[in-house]
Amino acid sequence: MHRLLMCLAALFALAACAAEPVWSPDDVVARAAYVHDGPPSITLFTVLNNTNNAGEHSALMINGSQRLLFDPAGTWRHPNLPERNDVHFGITPKMVDFYIDYHARENYRVVEQTVMVSPEVAELALERALAYGPVPKAQCARATTTVLRGLPGFETIPSTFGPKKVMRAFGQLPGVSERVITDDDANQNHGVLLVQAQETPF
């Protein structure tokens, strides 16, 4: 009986950690596709806590044949953007600004790091992000590093659960550019999504 209870507890724990799958229809995804005119690139977003300087979140923006946002276990959403298991389509410049504005606030800042890559590497990154599947909570950095470590030129990225560790390793890549975004908006940001929802992606 004790063993049965232990097994049931383990199953419930696994269920609690499982992420909810999301899969927008093909036609919706096709209509939302956004092709950015910039060079192929991969951008790492890292959200840092201004109080204790801890890393809070990791995400990737990939610019290839289209521009996608891989936001593993993220909480940002826009009603006009389709999603497939933490991959958001239709990442226009306005949507990038919305994503950053949602995270940068009184207690948090966003570090944006970008490296240029070949078209082939960008496409491989898109494929790996799309194939990853829904990401459980607290595994954003692990998912991000798993996608990156399978790419040529990103072999030095460690496998880790720590967003700051990913950020430091990404910052050592050749040719990386970086900027830090701060904002003094109130820390309660639920209203930001409501305001952004009234806007179209373009």
Image (spheres, rainbow, N blue to C red):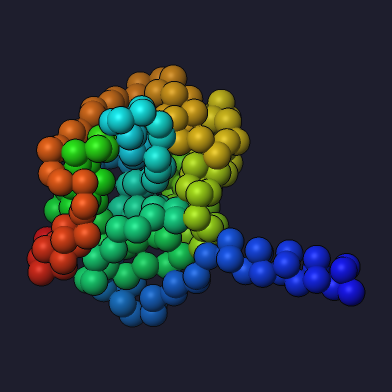
Residue found at x 44% / y 74%: 23
Residue 44 image-quadrant placement: top left
Q: Is residue 63 left or right of residue 155?
A: left
Q: Is residue 102 visible?
A: yes
- 151 in relation to 76, above or below: above
Residue 157 image-quadrant placement: top right
Residue found at x 52% / y 65%: 19
Quarter of the figure that contains the N terminus: bottom right
Q: In x, y percent, where is residue 85? A: 46, 65
- 18 in relation to 95, above or below: below
Q: In x, y percent, where is residue 72? A: 44, 53
Residue nearest the observer in this picture, 162 or 117: 162
Q: Is residue 113 visible?
A: no
Quarter of the figure that contains the C terminus: bottom left
Residue nearest the observer in this picture, 6 or 58: 6
- 18 in relation to 44, above or below: below
Q: Is residue 73 left or right of residue 159?
A: left
Residue farthest to the front, as pictured: 2
- 132 in relation to 163, above or below: below
Residue found at x 58% / y 31%: 158
Residue found at x 11% / y 63%: 195
Q: In x, y percent, where is residue 150? A: 58, 41
Q: Is residue 101 left or right of residue 146?
A: left
Q: In x, y percent, where is residue 28? A: 31, 77
How many tags in the picture?
0
